[in-house]
Image (spheres, rainbow, N blue to C red):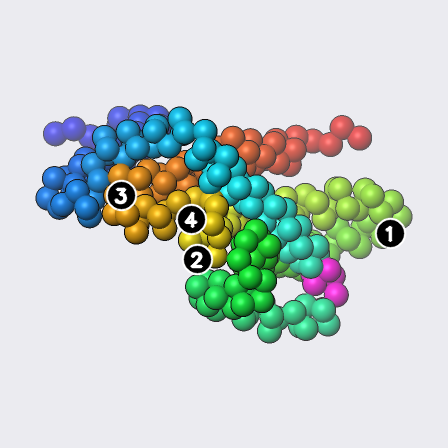
């Protein structure tokens, strides 16, 4: 009998194994259902490469979606972080924002989309407004709680030794906020892309969401699955090439002793 505890395999092995099992399960479903319901992995990849090779699709649908995602993340993360810092320092402000935070985190996204369509009409303004409004509370909560949990002894020591304000911000508050903020950004990024696509499906004539709606209407199952995969690739790309390096940089910064 094999003792699996004595076998050390790299984490990537299990990632690849899980991915292969997912593909096999997908293929099994495709073989047991109509092609109008489940596209095969081969059909999906073929449709994905066809879309990526279409300049019209890239400029009409992919680029607008990427711009909306970037703008929504900047506004949502920025506003959530600023309000979180202020709320962590000013208790009355935190209490005033509590009902708004509760409403935004409890209301279904589809309702927000419908309401914002009435307010802003159809287009980029509506998509960015919805998405940034819905992801800001995620960042706000993490940042506010981190600010409240900053070691009071460190703050008192900084006051006693008259540490300059910029050193307090970089050595105490920034280091305390770095990991929670990055965790919030990871969650916010995934939610951002999903919300952008949802809003585009209902209220724009450009973007991945609009392309998804067209594929659904025309029963183009392979394109539907390919567009879904493209959205997941965007999420994975942001996490692998941007968020993971940022996390490693923060970990190195926190583990290395200060040079000054």
Label 1 with label 3: CB-CB less than 8 Å? no
Label 1 with label 4: CB-CB less than 8 Å? no
x then y, percent, for residue 137: 58, 60
Residue behind mark 4: 210
**The one of 156 and 148 positioned closer to us in this rendering:** 148
Dot 2 or dot 3, earlier in sequence: 2
- SS type, badge 3: loop
Relative to 81, say whether 241 is above or below.
above
Residue behind mark 2: 202
Q: CA distance from mark 3 to mark 4?
A: 13 Å
Crowdedness of circle 2 by 10 Å Cα count: few (<14), some, many (20+)? Answer: some
Res. 228 image quadrant: top left
Position of 195 compared to 93: left or right? Answer: left
Residue depicted at x 83% and y 43%: 166
Residue 29, disc: none
Q: Say if the magenta span includes residue 88.
A: yes
Residue depicted at x 35% and y 28%: 49
Dot 4 or dot 2, earlier in sequence: 2
Crowdedness of circle 4 by 10 Å Cα count: few (<14), some, many (20+)? Answer: many
Residue 160, disc: 1
Q: CA distance from mark 2 to mark 3?
A: 18 Å
Dot 1 or dot 3, earlier in sequence: 1
Note whether residue 106 is visible. Answer: no
x then y, percent, for residue 117: 52, 63
Q: Where the N terminus falls, by quadrant? A: top left
- SS type, badge 4: helix
Q: CA distance from mark 4 to mark 2?
A: 8 Å
Q: Nearer the viewer, mark 1 or mark 3?
A: 3
| Residue range of the region highlighted in magenta in the rendering | 86-91
Q: Kindly give the residue lying farthest to the right in the view shown.
A: 162
**The one of 179 and 246 positioned closer to us in this rendering:** 246
Residue behind mark 3: 220
């Amino acid at each position: 009998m094999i003792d699996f505890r004595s076998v050390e395999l790299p984490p990537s092995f299990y990632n690849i194994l899980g991915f292969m099992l997912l593909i096999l399960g997908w293929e099994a479903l495709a073989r047991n259902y109509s092609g109008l319901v489940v596209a095969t992995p081969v059909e999906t990849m073929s449709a994905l490469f066809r879309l990526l090779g279409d300049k019209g699709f890239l400029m009409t649908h992919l680029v607008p979606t990427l711009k909306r995602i970037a703008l929504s993340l900047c506004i949502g993360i920025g506003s959530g972080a600023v309000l979180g810092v202020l709320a962590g320092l000013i208790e009355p402000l935190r209490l005033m924002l509590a009902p708004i935070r509760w409403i935004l985190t409890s209301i279904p996204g589809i309702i927000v989309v419908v309401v914002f369509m009435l307010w802003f009409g159809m287009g980029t303004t509506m998509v960015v407004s919805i998405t940034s409004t819905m992801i800001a509370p995620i960042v706000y909560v993490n940042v506010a709680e981190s600010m409240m949990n900053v070691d009071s002894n460190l703050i008192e020591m900084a006051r006693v030794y008259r540490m300059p304000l910029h050193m307090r911000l970089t050595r105490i508050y920034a280091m305390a906020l770095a990991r929670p903020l990055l965790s919030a950004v990871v969650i916010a990024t995934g939610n951002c892309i999903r919300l952008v696509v949802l809003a585009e499906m209902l209220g724009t004539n450009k973007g991945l969401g609009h392309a998804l709606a067209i594929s659904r209407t025309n029963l183009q199952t392979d394109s539907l699955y390919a567009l879904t995969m493209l959205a997941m690739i965007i999420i994975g790309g942001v996490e692998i090439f941007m968020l993971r390096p940022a996390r490693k940089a923060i970990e190195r910064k926190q583990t290395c002793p200060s040079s000054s």
